[in-house]
Amino acid sequence: MTFSVLFSLLLAVCSITLLIRFFLQKRRQERLYKQIQAFLLHPFVPEYSVRDDFFALLENAAADLENKILTEHANTIAQSKQNADFVADISHQLKTPLAALKLYCEMDAGLYPNAHIDKQLVLIEHMENLIHSLLRLENLKADAYTMSFQMQEMHQLILDIWNDLHALYPAKCFTLEGKASLRCDATWMKEAILNILKNSCEHTSENGSIHVILEQTENAVHITIRDNGGGVPKDELPKLFQRFFHSSRNTSKNSAGIGLAITKEIITKHHGIVTAANDIYGLCTYINLPIVDGMQSYEIVS
């Protein structure tokens, strides 16, 4: 066998070996990519590679990162539950004396009616509503509620919300355009949108207008809620969805400042985001909700 034939055979073997290594490496890359994508959808405890090569370092680094994310998520859930338990304890401690105080005020109102007692009853009711709203917000953050996701026609869902709200604001001009379908928890989604619509009603004139636009793309549902209330100062926009925040345009004395914070938490539980911006007429609130196929009812076990 001549040297040229041996060289050709050796070259062929080397080429085949390199091709095999290339395809094996490509398969490992694809497997790592699929693992990361699966982890982002449904976090799980990752497996470490026992190989002794450079790519194994990358696989194990990804596994380390996934484990850290799982640990941080568990810590966040634990902290949220601790906060919810703390709020629940405080709420329980406050409800009993408030109920007694309300009873005494109502008894005094019957015997010695005066304006001060009426104001006291209003303040007690406001405190009760505040405690209830704060407890619901913390329970949402701690995943204490089970959400049931089903396909909903958003046009009808928003119409139902406005039909309930319209009796309180009969002079408001409400318009709704567009169609969209979304898998969501109808009860919680109604509350999220209701809080925004109510906020718009409270911050527009008696015959103010509210316009809702629904848009659906291949990957998401977009809800835009516009009012003509003049908007808010630019520095207040990032704070609108923080709990206890009261905008300078807020004229309601009974607002607890928690409704929009609850809205944000509900939208977050639906894997979406909610933001706000001013336009030439007033405030625009944008809700962006991804379309996630096969989303099931879930309950985070704390």
Image: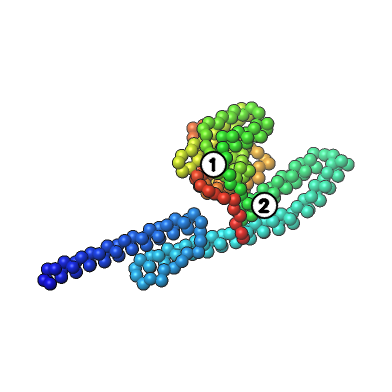
Q: Is residue 20 left or right of residue 293?
A: left
Q: Is residue 252 left or right of residue 55?
A: right
At label 2, the amino acid type is: Leu
Front residue (pair 142, 125): 142
Secondary structure type for disc 2: helix
**Residue 160 at x, y percent in the picture:** 63, 35
Earlier sequence position, callout 2 versus callout 1: 2
Quarter of the image containing the C terminus?
A: bottom right
Q: Quadrant of the N terminus?
A: bottom left
Q: Residues within 10 Å of mark 1 (few under 14, many from 20)?
A: many
Q: Looking at the image, which residue is at 66% across and 50% down?
A: 136
Where does residue 299 sit, x and y in percent of width and height? Answer: 61, 55
- Please tell me how crowded label 2 is: few (under 14), some (14-19), or many (20+) other residues with Cα within 10 Å: many
Q: Residue placed at 73% from the left, 48% from the top?
A: 128
Horizontal side, residue 275 vs residue 141: left or right: left
- Per the image, the residue denoted by label 2 is 135
Which residue is more in the foreground, 44 or 262? 44
Q: Residue at x 63, y 60 (%)?
A: 82
User: Which amino acid, mark 1?
Assistant: Leu
- Give the labeled residue for mark 1: 182
Tell me how far mark 2 sits from mark 1, CA to CA.
28 Å
The residue that appears at 18% across and 68% down in the rendered structure is 9
- Marks 2 & 1, CB-CB < 8 Å contact: no
Q: Is residue 219 visible?
A: yes
Residue 30 lies, with reference to residue 295, above or below; the image says: below
Residue 79 location, quadrant = bottom right
